[in-house]
Amino acid sequence: MTLPARTQLANEDLLPVAPDRRTWNWWHIASLWIGMAICIPTYTLASGLMASGWTWQAAVGAVILGNVVVLIPIALNSHAGTRYGIPFPVLARASFGVLGANLPALLRGLVACGWFGIQTWIGGWAIYKLIEVMWPGIATLPQLLPAFVGLNTGEFLCFMVFWAMNVWIVLRGMDSIKFLETWGSPFLLAVGAALFIWAWVRAGSLSVMLQNPSIGPSAHQPVGSVFGAGLTSAVAFWGTMALSIPDFSRYARSQRDQLVGQAVGLPATMALFAFIGAAVTNATVVIFGTRIADPVALLARIGGPLMIMLSMAGLIIATLTTNIAANIVAPANGFSNLAPHKITFKQGATITAVIGILMMPWRLYNDAAAYIFTWLIGYGALLGPVAGIMIADYFVVRRGELIVNDLYRRHGVYEYSRGFNWVAIGALALGVLPSLPGFVAALRGVPETGLFGTIYNWAWFVGFLISGLLYCVGMRVKGVPMRGPIGASAGG
């Protein structure tokens, strides 16, 4: 493919990955997912559902089923990345148009900014608790921030230290991310296993750890509604990566490597760490007399400076691996896609990092109800339709055939109407529409209980199916060619 390094639609970060740089085997892909899945939000996903009255079996079951389900769109969207070496924003041009692709790229990017902020807050909080053990005075530093920020000086400084660590690593490029994920994953598994064994020993038996509350808030809600909310939150948890996975699969050596790596790395790891979170959270009721769902707060109470230092180091590494892979690469490419001739991957990463601070993520994460039922399900309602459109376009409309050169130039087959495919944009809007009443109600803190409440609890699935179906119908009615000329896809 002969293209200049920088044009209105291309730069060195968005161009197809050369064959000699496609070096990630199945273990590199699996390590990527292990490193991303073992993180504090995974730990708290099941324990947060249990706090709403779920049994641990139902909570962990929803996480397992959700990750098996979301593995399907992840694997499907990975196919184009591996075959053509293109990132998510470029793949989105095939369905949304060469300019219209900025819409899904921005939606994905802004959600990632929120996640980047949440993970950075978690990592910074772990650093804060670690320093507090060695120097309690960090909690009483002079207050320099306005009250509306909601953090003391020490907490904010630790947040910024972890923020700088993330930015430093990602600015070193994809090879440093590959190294971090490959070597960090086994260590993270060991930390999770050690925490589980500690809780088992302190609680006295596994049966004590796995006792369920006799009743909870979810007991008064329809089973389908409650399960839908849990399953949708579990799917939406990685619904972001279901879109942007081509950013990584483009480095895979083969389709087998990306498929095996993801099947090995994602569902089992999420199931294991969600189970650890549920079991250990249950054990804290026996050990401390109160439920402690936050592993940072739990590890700070375990005792002994050495133990706290080791455990906090593990949490910091866990958060770092997840944050860089899941929450910086995608928005960096997305922001670069807005103006490739002006914004590089590194500049896009910097924009992501700055927005992550401005969103004040500690306020969102510290409210479990807002985190699961507003944040996770809310953005699932937004991104599910995008996934439906992209998968329908690539597999149903185009049967896997793309004209790569035209993805990087104006007035090609992906020009549509002045760079925008209004069929895709209309399908996206109609896919989001049914979930809007439920989202508005969740924002008000008074969840819908009728039809719109049920639709909202299944938002990712509803949007995925509606938008994907409408897109296929709209493209057929419009008479858009479903495949390029024979051999045209070889342009990469």
Image (cartoon, helix red, strand yellow):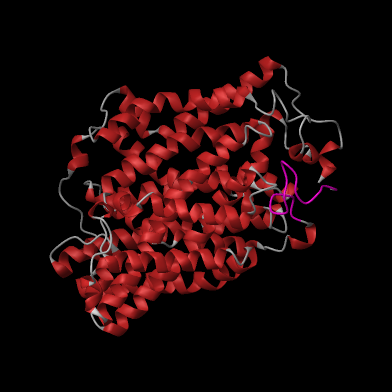
Q: Is residue 387 left or right of residue 320?
A: right
Q: In this view, does 169 lie above or below 431?
A: below
- Quadrant for residue 488, please give it: top right
Viewer-nearest residue: 60 or 230: 230
Residue lying furthest left in this view?
Answer: 289
Viewer-nearest residue: 22 or 415: 415
Viewer-nearest residue: 115 or 251: 115
Residue at 38 percent of width and 69 percent of height: 315
Number of numbered discs present?
0
Q: Is residue 475 above or below residue 386?
A: above
Q: Is residue 342 magenta?
A: no
**Residue 221 picture location, percent across and down:** 22, 34
Q: In this view, does 356 lie above or below 187?
A: above
**Residue 377 picture location, percent across and down:** 38, 39
Q: Can residue 18 be seen in this view?
A: yes
**Residue 11 picture location, percent across and down:** 72, 50
Instruction: Give the residues in magenta.
Output: 2-17
Q: In this view, does 310 lie to the left or right of 21?
A: left
Magenta: main secondary structure equals loop
Residue at 27 percent of width and 49 percent of height: 368
